[in-house]
Amino acid sequence: MEIKQLMKTFAFDGKVEWLSYRPGPTSKGDIRITDTIEVTEKKGIVGDRYKGTSRKRQVTIIQAEHIEAVAKMLRKDSIDPALLRRNIVVSGINLLAFNDSTFQIGDVILQMTGYCHPCSRMEDNLGTGGYNAMRGHGGITCMVVKGGTIKIGDTVSFLS
């Protein structure tokens, strides 16, 4: 099989494990953990503070497996996903393999626009070494191609 085909071949679909949005400034820590989010092409996640005009960071996603790896590096049993400031936690699929590709979660279609690098707040939220533990494990940023609803348990599938 050629590399181009291998890059489009996944053993299994992923699954949505956790959802959140932030209605106000993140410095106040106001986060809403929910079972369902509504997503639009223009605004991203309905009710979220995101106001960027580039649309490149409308949705942020991280893998549950990477959260577990970060916890191990920090010698913690677990990490609350709310501390990581991402919108969606998924499991069972390699998000980094979605580079420059589209994928579907529920009835929403997203396009990966980049990596979600950690910010200095990770040191405060996770403790000493939190920033470096998150490097390479921060997830991805996405723009919305087609809006709709995302729910806990929804399938995450590569499209193209």
Image (tube, rainbow, N blue to C red):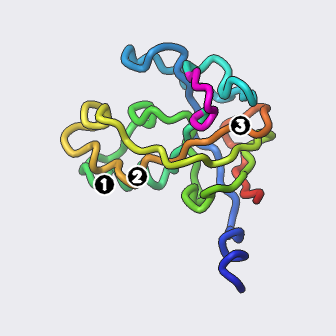
Q: Which residues are magenta?
A: 50-57
Residue 22 locus on image (x, y percent): 52, 21
Residue that label 2 marks: 68
Residue that label 1 marks: 72
SS of the residue at dot 2?
helix
User: Camera-side residue: 118 or 155?
Assistant: 118
Residue 149 locus on image (x, y percent): 76, 32
Residue 72 locus on image (x, y percent): 31, 54
Q: Indicate which disc, 1 or 3, sits on the residue closer to the N terminus.
A: 1
Residue 6 locus on image (x, y percent): 67, 76
- Check residue 132 for magenta coloring: no
Q: Dividing the image into 4 quarters, which one contains the C terminus?
A: bottom right
Residue that label 3 marks: 144
Contact, CB < 8 Å: mark 1 with mark 2?
yes
Q: Dividing the image into 4 quarters, which one contains the N terminus?
A: bottom right
- Residue pictured at 49% horizontal, 49% vertical: 115
- Residue pictured at 37% horizontal, 55% vertical: 69
The amino acid on which the numbered mark 2 sits, given as a three-letter code, is Glu
Reply above or below: 30 against 61. above
- In the picture, measured across the screen, residue 139 lies left or right of residue 107, that is left
Crowding near pointer 2: few (<14 within 10 Å), some, many (20+)? Answer: some
Estimate the spatial distance between the alpha carbons at disc 2 and disc 3, rounded to whole Å.
27 Å
- In the picture, measured across the screen, residue 83 lies left or right of residue 154, that is left
The amino acid on which the numbered mark 1 sits, given as a three-letter code, is Lys
Reply above or below: 48 against 94. above
Contact, CB < 8 Å: mark 2 with mark 3?
no
Crowding near pointer 1: few (<14 within 10 Å), some, many (20+)? Answer: some
Estimate the spatial distance between the alpha carbons at disc 1 and disc 3, rounded to whole Å.
32 Å
- Residue pictured at 72% horizontal, 49% vertical: 155
